Every structure is written in C-alpha cells, then in structure tokens.
Image (cartoon, helix red, strand yellow):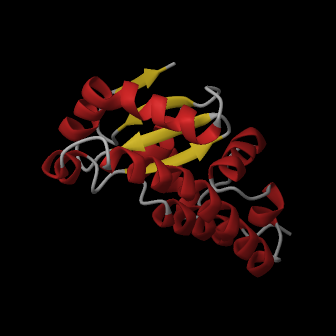
Amino acid sequence: MINIKRVGEIIARNRKELSMTQTQLGEILKVSHQAVSKWERGECLPDIDILVQLAKIFNTTVDYFLTQEENDAHTSRTNIVNNKEDIWKSVLEKIKDQISQPSFDRWFTDTKAIQIDNTLIISGQDQFTTDWLYQRYSHMISKTIDEIRGDNDLELTFLFSKGTENTEP
C-alpha cells in the first residue's frame, strides 16, 4: 500500500534540498503551488505523469516515492544530484575568471541551478538578479556551458519563484 504522507514528506524534503519553493516546483511542473502543498501535506498523490517529472527533477525513480526502499534510492539520488551540481560549479569557476570580482559577487554568488533532462534552470537570489542574469549574462553562461560540455544541447531557463520565466535557446 502506498503511504501518501510519506510520499508528501519525500517531495517536500527533496524540494527543500534543491532550495526550491512550492511555487517554483509548481511552475516547472505546470501546476499550482496549492497542488504541490496538497501533495506535501499528504492530502493527495500527484498523477503518475507528475511523479515521472518529479523523479527527473529529483534525479531518482518513481519507485523512490512509492516504495519503502527510501535509503538506497536517496543515497543514489544524492550522488546524481552532486554530479549535476558540478556542471554549475564549473560554470561559476569559469565565469569568475571572465568578469570582475565585484560583478561576480553581486550577480553569481547566491545563484542556484538544477538540471532537468536537457534544461538547466538558473535562479538568482531575487527576481531582479534572475532577470539581470538572463539579460546580461545568458550568452556568457550558454557559451561557458558549451565549452564545458562540448555541445550546445542544454537549454537555459532563468526562473524565480514569484515571477517570469525567461528561456534562452
């Protein structure tokens, strides 16, 4: 039997580990923040297609949400997340050498990025910072990612929880 409360706790914990708000997760999944809240409180389960998307976001499997084998799945998910976070860390290291230290400190220090499939979602500390990163630095970020990965298959999305979403092809 599926433990709905446990599924909600897993969603909440993993969302918080990625420093995402319910609104941000809802925007990515194209659902309301109220839906995310209901899942996290254990009032209902997400549809199976949403569970598949959640598994991608949290770099795990649908089984991770639905079975009692949480410890093994959580450990392997953490390892995968750390590998994907290395991409953003590498980007930040290269960009740090390309711009002034004050600019880097102001615009990049508190940024976060998560990768879902072929999309890297970048978020600044507030809406203004996120918009500025998109407007001023998206080309530099894209070029740096291409250099690191050796391809240009990764789409960039700039997203802050309260507002607009900007996408760089």
* Residue placed furthest toward the bottom: 71
> In the picture, residue 105 is in which quadrant?
bottom left
Query: Which residue is pictured at 65% across the width and 69% down the height?
Result: 78
Q: Position of residue 71 (x, y in %)?
A: 75, 81
Closer-to-camera residue (99/54): 99
Q: Is residue 129 above or below residue 87?
A: above
**Residue 130 lies in what quarter of the image?**
top left
Q: Is residue 21 visible?
A: no
- Residue at 35% from the left image edge and 44% from the top image edge: 95
Front residue of this view, candidates 105 and 16: 105
Please, is residue 59 above or below residue 136 in the view?
Answer: below
- Within the image, what quadrant is residue 61 found in? bottom right
Q: Residue at x 52, y 18 (%)?
A: 169
Instruction: Give the farthest residue toward the top.
Output: 169
Answer yes or no: is residue 152 visible.
Answer: yes
Q: In screen coordinates, is 50 left or right of 82?
A: right
Residue 131 appears left or right of 93: left
Residue 65 x/y as whole percent: 74, 63
Estimate the x, y position of residue 104 in percent, counting from the top left: 23, 49
Horizontally, residue 94 falls left or right of residue 70, namely left
Image location (x, y in percent) of residue 127: 23, 38
Q: Is residue 20 above or below residue 48?
A: below
